[in-house]
Amino acid sequence: MKVLVTGGAGYIGSHTVLSLLENNYEVIVYDSLVNSSIESLNRVEKLTGKKVEFIEGDICDKDKLSEVFEQFTIGAVIHFAALKAVGESAKIPLSYYQNNVYGTVCLLEVMEHNNVHDFIFSSSATVYGEENDVPYVETMKLGTPSSPYGASKVMVERVLNDLALSDSNFRGVSLRYFNPIGAHESGQIGEDPKGIPNNLLPYVAQVAVGKREKLSIFGDDYPTQDGSCERDYLHVMDLAQGHVAALDWLNRHNDFTGVEAFNLGTGNGVSVFAIVKAFEKAIDKTIPFEVSPRRAGDLPAFWANATKANEQLNWHAERNLTQMMSDTWRWQSSNPNGYLA
Ligand code: NAD
Ligand code: UFG
């Protein structure tokens, strides 16, 4: 079966493409490379010994997308392509809504036109907003995230629900990721943020490799065990395998139509201080840090109830925190400048 993967050259996309190839799916990647490098896919090809069809294009370009659907017989779409920087989204909200919401609508229109109905969407824990208690469970109502980025994910989930109500052939899965970290165990592919990293692990890894002086820990006065924020960190290869599990689930459930949401997380909250300690232990080196003020919009703590994915997708996050840290380090230390090196 041929799977179209939008945003497949990016961090989660490249790891998922690798998992798909290892599970005998054929892959076509469609990516504008706005936040990634083609080198990630070259490396996936080397690691798997399989070919990745690559088309450079924007999801907002319906003509180009249409050509892809005409050229290939596509069975399903996994949709990663989006802008994802929470802070930036408050500065340029229109770009985020254009790219993440309008772009997704363009893709869905082209899919509908070509009678492709199976769709897996990169959603986020952020859709639970500030209203819901932890652990988050899929039966909770969609919340109100504090950022335009988060709002764009809620909007797309609404679009999918409305589409499913109007089109009895549509088969959608929203995968709500918690905090993916780590890298493929080979150290050949990993997260390669442009500029100063926004997320915790890439920042810690860049401090460890000497690219940044010290980590700022955003707040130690939260109502948590050690005062720093708690998140549900999961290994990116477990997350990648979650996409294969979701595709297998769609293929097993021929009679399914509608939209299902699944949380992909470990079910455990881990604090920022605990992450720093775990990283230090994995690399046997100290990470210099300072505590600085809270970052606007951060919630104190959230983690997943992942029972639905465990039971229905037969998926579990299997890799532990030690492996997440050592794989991050293997990637960062052997590629200090990411894919540019
Ligand atoms: P990423 O930036 O590494 O990957 C996104 C990819 O999409 C990049 O290769 C980029 O070039 C491409 N892209 C962006 N806009 C495009 C467009 N208009 N047309 C074509 N390609 C485009 O990010 P990632 O961390 O791999 O995230 C993948 C998806 O998962 C995103 O939808 C993101 O919102 C979602 N997500 C990520 C996280 C996380 O912590 N990384 C958490 C929850 C959800
Ligand atoms: N943090 C620091 N210092 C840093 C970076 C982060 O202390 O330099 C802290 C943050 O305050 C937060 C924790 O580390 O407490 C994790 O921060 P990340 O930015 O790595 O992750 P977030 O949980 O803030 O964001 C993630 C995804 C977003 C998504 C959001 C909500 O990256 O895509 O979860 O689901 F919107």
Image (cartoon, rainbow, N blue to C red):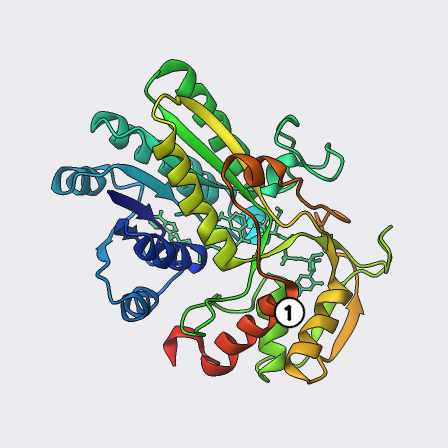
- Please name whichever residue, 95 or 126, is drawn nearer the observer in this view of the structure: 126
Q: Is residue 9 visible?
A: no
* Residue kind at label 1, given as amino acid type: Thr
Which residue is found at the position 45% from the left and 33% from the top? 173
View quadrant of ligand 2: bottom right
Judge left or right: residue 92 versus residue 45.
Answer: right
Most foreground residue, 5 or 106: 5
Mark 1 vs ligand 2: CB under 8 Å? no
* Residue sitting at x 25%, y 67%: 49
Task: Locate residue 258, reporting x and y percent.
Answer: 43, 22
On screen, 138 above or below 161? Answer: below
Above or below 154: residue 322: below
Residue 8, image quadrant: bottom left
Residue 61 on image: x %, y %: 26, 41
Viewed as shown, does residue 153 lie left or right of 69?
right
Decide if residue 274 is in sight here. Answer: yes
Q: From the top left corner, tell me how far across and down residue 148 is, in percent.
A: 56, 41
Relative vertical location of residue 61 with respect to residue 17 in this rendering, above or below: above
Res 132 → quadrant: top right
The residue beneath circle 1 is: 322
Look at the numbered disc 1 and give the secondary structure of its residue. Answer: helix
For the view shown, which residue lies furthest in the left direction? Answer: 71
In the rendered image, the quadrant that contains the N terminus is top left
